[in-house]
Image (cartoon, rainbow, N blue to C red):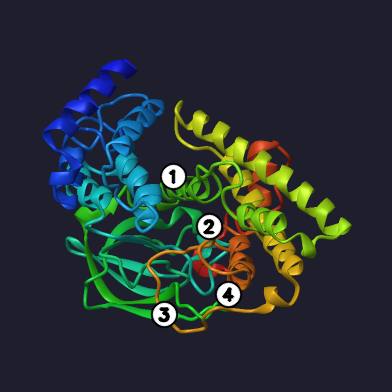
């Protein structure tokens, strides 16, 4: 099947057999996955039909017109955007069959156990250890800035399995069961008042070897698939014109003429144009994804996303004057998702400060763009050939 009309017909036949109004939401999502209409570019039997990614819009349009439920993608974004493509590329047949369906339907939430207190920007310096004991790996260490850890059933985890080789070569990639008694999740309260992130402590957590993704010591290469997809997911999300952070500012400008000044007008025009350029660049990046895996260009999109969010939210606070300093709710809570546009200007201003840290710091992403996109000489790295155990920490 390669024809959009044929896929449209298939989707309508599915809707006739599973009318959204008369089908339980979870039953509908499971049936959609089994019919290959979850992500059509995935292989048959894994929620797809082996079709070009570009045909997904055909399915989505038919389902939306019929009022079909979605899988709440914002709530399960880590699973959809990071875990799924990594499992698809490196997982065994058994791993794909076990994890992809409940991941896509949202029955099982995923989180990402990568960053550590001493290994954030320099992620390859991570110190969480995984030691082989028979058919299991015993993991000890600490992870930090873990979104959704308080909700997650599974985690993608990288840990050091060989301290005697340079840092990039001694890492292995695992799927970690977040219900293991050795996993402790503690909330991290942020400047917004919420505990959207967590720190996770791993104490003698046993991971069977059949939950390893990729080869032993090959975790850094596997992690690049996750990280490239993460940056695209953060910086390249599909938005309508004036979607995202620029929308609330533009609405305020139109509805509150008494707040306008010439200087603010010039700054708003500049940021509106930049936001539209970023949106269209994201569309082009998604079209490139049709031809293969995401490349380092996603780092550039994520860079633009962070800078624009911070500049736009700062402009919004200035535009609103004293109102911009108000904050709706400092209550400590552990949200299921980040809602930039559903909160007030103060929240957007504070929360956007994290955009230049999460998903790779802007400084690290600048290096990636310089070296992998522009082809500039790499920065000198004195630790490339030094065993991890001999690095200064």
Q: Dot 1: within a 10 Å radius of its alpha carbon, few (fewer than 14), some, or many (20 or more) residues?
A: many
| Residue drawn at (28%, 42%) of the image | 67
Query: Which numbered disc, 1 or 4, marks the residue closer to the eye?
Result: 1
Circles 3 and 4: CB distance less than 8 Å?
no
Quarter of the image where the N terminus is located: top left
Q: Quadrant of residue 328?
A: bottom right
Query: Which numbered disc, 3 or 2, marks the residue closer to the eye?
Result: 3
Q: Is mark 3 on a helix, strand or loop?
A: loop
Circles 1 and 3: CB distance less than 8 Å?
no
Earlier residue among tags 1 and 4:
1
Residue beneath disc 3: 333
Label 1 vs label 4: CA separation? 27 Å
| Residue drawn at (47%, 64%) of the image | 338
Residue beneath disc 2: 359
Circles 1 and 4: CB distance less than 8 Å?
no
Q: Say left or right for 274 vs 220.
A: right
Q: Is mark 1 on a helix, strand or loop?
A: helix
Q: Dot 4: within a 10 Å radius of its alpha carbon, few (fewer than 14), some, or many (20 or more) residues?
A: few
Q: Dot 3: within a 10 Å radius of its alpha carbon, few (fewer than 14), some, or many (20 or more) residues?
A: few
Q: Say left or right for 343 vs 221.
A: right
Earlier residue among tags 2 and 4:
2
Label 1 vs label 3: CA separation? 32 Å
Q: Is mark 2 on a helix, strand or loop?
A: loop
Circles 2 and 1: CB distance less than 8 Å?
no
Which numbered tag is attached to residue 50?
none
Residue beneath disc 1: 225
In depth, the one of 64 and 230 nearer the eye is 64
Which numbered tag is attached to residue 393?
4
Q: What element carries label 4?
A: loop
Label 2 vs label 1: CA separation? 13 Å
Label 2 vs label 4: CA separation? 23 Å
């Amino acid at each position: 099947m390669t024809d959009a009309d044929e896929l449209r017909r298939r989707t309508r036949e599915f809707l006739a057999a599973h009318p959204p109004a008369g089908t339980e939401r979870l039953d509908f999502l499971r049936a959609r996955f089994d019919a290959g209409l979850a992500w059509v570019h995935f292989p048959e039997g894994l929620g797809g039909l082996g079709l070009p990614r570009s045909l997904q819009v055909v399915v989505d349009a038919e389902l939306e017109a019929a009022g079909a439920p979605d899988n709440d993608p914002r709530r399960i974004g880590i699973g959809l955007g990071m875990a799924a493509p990594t499992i698809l590329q490196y997982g065994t047949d058994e791993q794909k069959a076990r994890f992809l369906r409940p991941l896509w339907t949202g029955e099982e939430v995923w989180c990402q156990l990568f960053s550590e207190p001493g290994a954030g920007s320099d992620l390859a310096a991570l110190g969480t250890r995984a030691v082989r004991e028979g058919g299991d790996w015993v993991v000890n260490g600490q992870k930090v800035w873990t979104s959704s850890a308080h909700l997650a059933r599974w985690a993608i985890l990288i840990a050091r399995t060989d301290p005697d080789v340079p840092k990039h070569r001694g890492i292995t990639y695992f799927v970690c069961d977040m219900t293991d008694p050795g996993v402790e999740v503690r909330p991290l309260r942020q400047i917004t008042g919420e505990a959207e992130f967590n720190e996770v402590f791993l104490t003698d957590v046993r991971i069977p070897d059949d939950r390893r993704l990729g080869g032993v010591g090959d975790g850094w290469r596997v992690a690049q698939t996750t990280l490239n997809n993460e940056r695209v997911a953060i910086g390249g999300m599909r938005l309508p014109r004036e979607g995202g952070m620029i929308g609330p500012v533009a609405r305020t400008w139109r509805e509150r003429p008494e707040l306008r000044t010439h200087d603010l007008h010039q700054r708003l025009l500049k940021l509106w144009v930049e936001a539209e350029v970023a949106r269209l660049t994201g569309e082009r990046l998604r079209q490139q994804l049709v031809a293969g895996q995401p490349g380092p260009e996603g780092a550039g999109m994520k860079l633009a996303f962070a800078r624009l969010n911070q500049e736009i939210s700062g402009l919004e606070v200035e535009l609103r004057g004293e109102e911009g300093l108000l904050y709706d709710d400092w209550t400590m809570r552990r949200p299921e998702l980040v809602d930039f546009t559903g909160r007030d200007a103060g929240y957007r201003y504070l929360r956007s400060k994290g955009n230049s840290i999460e998903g790779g710091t802007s400084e690290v992403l600048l290096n990636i763009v310089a070296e992998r996109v522009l082809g500039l000489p790499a920065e000198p790295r004195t630790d490339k050939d030094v065993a991890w155990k001999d690095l200064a920490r």
